[in-house]
Image (cartoon, rainbow, N blue to C red):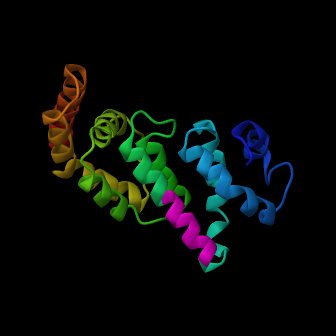
Amino acid sequence: MLTAAALSPYAWNGLYTWGDVEEFKHYLPRLLELLILEELDGLHAPSLMLRLGVRWQTWSKIEQEAVIGTVGAWWRQTLSSYPRDVDGMDLIEIIADDLKLDLAPHLAEWESNTTEAAARHMAWLMHDFTVAVAHGAEWYALLDRWIRGTAPAVILERGFFSASSPEVAQELSDALETHRIWSRH
């Protein structure tokens, strides 16, 4: 099986410097697996997803379903462990902006995830999103409305009451306060 070290040069250069779409399709499952497992540096994600995003919707139905399924697995893995090389907001941008997938089911999955990691990702997002540059895309408006709604508070409160340490509880409490301020505007 190809290692991250062996595929790293291809992750940087595939389709740009060498290779074609068929070769990209061949290596993509392993590249995505390595990203999900965090064996391949998360710095590769934006470039790979940009290359994927401009092509994948013209692929066969089975290939498209494989991409959707893999991105779903990546999302679930992200929500279940914290921190991650590719953080929640980066993955949201991959899902909604690069791949043009519907963000709503992913946000609903976040709402139903009861792990501390999901709450910590929410805490991170509360602080990251409030300083993010405005974005005119429809998915960004959806995310903005969702963040201003009740779901983030529920996720943060649930995490706060089951926090594994006082430090995590404080992190979630601070994010909850940020949410309260953010949701008033």
- Which residue is nearer to you in this view: 28 or 136? 28
Residue 111 in the image: x percent, y percent? 25, 54
Which quadrant would residue 35 be assigned to in this image?
Answer: top right
Q: Which residues are magenta?
A: 62-71
Residue 57 in the image: x percent, y percent? 61, 72
Q: Hey, which residue is sitting farthest bottom in the picture?
A: 61
Q: Is residue 24 above or below residue 13?
A: below
Q: What residue do we see at 34% from left, 39% from top?
A: 121
In the image, is residue 124 part of the stretch drawn in magenta? Answer: no
Q: What residue do we see at 29% from left, 60% from top?
A: 108
Residue 52 in the image: x percent, y percent? 65, 59
Q: Hey, which residue is sitting farthest right in the picture?
A: 18
Residue 120 in the image: x percent, y percent? 30, 35
Q: Is 153 displayed left or right of 99 in the figure?
A: left
Quarter holding the C terminus is: top left
Q: Hey, which residue is sitting farthest top in the picture?
A: 167
Q: What residue do we see at 40% from left, 59% from top?
A: 139
- Which residue is nearer to you in this view: 137 or 12? 12
Which quadrant would residue 167 be assigned to in this image?
Answer: top left
Q: Is residue 109 above or below residue 156?
A: below
Q: What residue do we see at 55% from left, 57% from top?
A: 98
Q: Is 93 displayed left or right of 56 in the figure?
A: left
Q: Is 91 displayed left or right of 116 in the figure?
A: right
Note whether residue 149 is visible. no
In the image, is residue 64 part of the stretch drawn in magenta? Answer: yes
* Figure disc tally: 0
Overall secondary structure of the magenta section: helix
Q: Is 129 displayed left or right of 145 in the figure?
A: right
Q: Is residue 86 above or below residue 151?
A: above
Q: Hey, which residue is sitting farthest front in the picture?
A: 1
Note whether residue 59 is visible. yes
